[in-house]
Image (spheres, grey):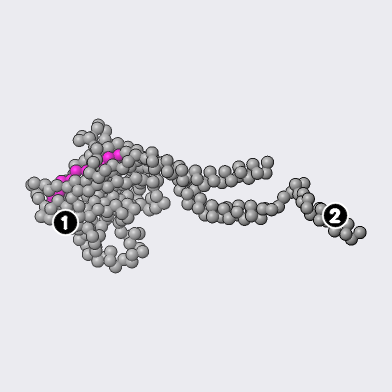
Amino acid sequence: MVNRRKARIAIALNVSILMPMLAVLVAVITAPAVTAAGSCDVPASNPPGMSQYFEEHSLEDGSFWEDWGWGEQNELRPLRSDFSVDMTISNDSANAVRMELIPGYQYTFCISMSPDPSDEPEMGAVGDVYLMNDINWDRYAMSYENREWEDLEGLVEEIPVEWRDTLVWLPYRDVHAYEGVSDHVFSVAIDSMGSAWSSVGWFSSTETQYYLVIDGWDNEKFSDRGAAGGTINVEVLVDVEERTTLPNFIAYILISALPIACIIGPLIIHSRYMKMGLSDEEESRQMAYLDNEGDERSGEED
């Protein structure tokens, strides 16, 4: 009975350590393949009612002040289907597509820029692409409004690096910035709804809104592309696919599995080592040759 109980405990410990790893392996194998670059499979025209899922903004039409409460924003539905949009980026300006991205989906963005024949850009149809949340969009739009007041690049350079993320705008996850491109494809998946800092933005909604920005002006980033010197036509395709997601607690289990194994393993080995050679009194028996040796010595003494 004792051995069976020990075997069951050992099996339970091994299963608790190996199951999270097996779950991750199964999720990776069964997950759909990532869409290949340049292969956004999006219909040429949007289905009816698609305007409820995205909204186009321009820095030149005053939509910046709408975001700060001077106007009313249309409430968007969570994005679960593909769509496409054509935009015209004027010289020294920028346009954006506002969306509500949600967990459980993978979003692939295909951006293609071309020169406008009526106003061909001097520097070619090349611009910058950024994905940002609503708080950073507010900062981005404010920096555009203040672009003529002072040297933005010099001002940003004077701000300590550790404070820049609280004062200047940043792309989503600090990585979704693609500068000096004419055609580009990238994908993103949202892990959670909202943010711990979502309450910082003025007049912000409960769900975090995301902006796909096509930039055609010389913003305060040092690596960005300058103004194109003309008009750029932009085609944006958004491919939406469901993806396999694991519960959040799986990450905590995987992180804690190795430390727990390092603690429990030595304890089990030490415990079994200390018990080796020990037995219950009922099972203890004297060996026969020791008894015979004792009898012979007692006979000699007599």
Q: Is residue 266 left or right of residue 118?
A: right
Secondary structure character of the magenta stretch overall: strand
Whole-angstrom CA distance, mark 2 to mark 1, is 109 Å
Q: Nearer the viewer, residue 97 or 275?
A: 275
Residue 94 is tagged as none
Label 2 sits on residue:
295
Q: Is residue 235 magenta?
A: yes
The picture places residue 218, in percent across and down from the top left corner, at 20, 58
Is residue 97 shown to the viewer in this render? no
Q: Amino acid at mark 1?
A: Ala
| Residue extending farthest left | 118
Residue 227 is tagged as 1
The picture places residue 96, in percent across and down from the top left corner, at 24, 47
| Residue extending farthest top | 48
Q: Is residue 68 magenta?
A: no
Task: Give the residue at x 77% y 51%.
Answer: 287
Sequence order check, earlier mark of 2 and 1: 1
Is residue 93 placed above or below 56 in the rendered structure? below
SS state under label 1 = loop
Task: Give the residue at x 18% y 58%.
Answer: 226
Q: Are marks 2 and 1 in contact (CB under 8 Å)?
A: no
Is residue 48 shown to the viewer in this render? yes
Task: Give the residue at x 42% y 41%.
Answer: 26
Q: Nearer the viewer, residue 4 or 41?
A: 4
Q: Over which residues does the magenta segment extend?
A: 230-240
Image quadrant occupied by the C terminus: bottom right
The picture places residue 31, in percent across and down from the top left corner, at 37, 40
Callout 1: few (<14), some (14-19), or many (20+) C-alpha neighbours within 10 Å?
Answer: many
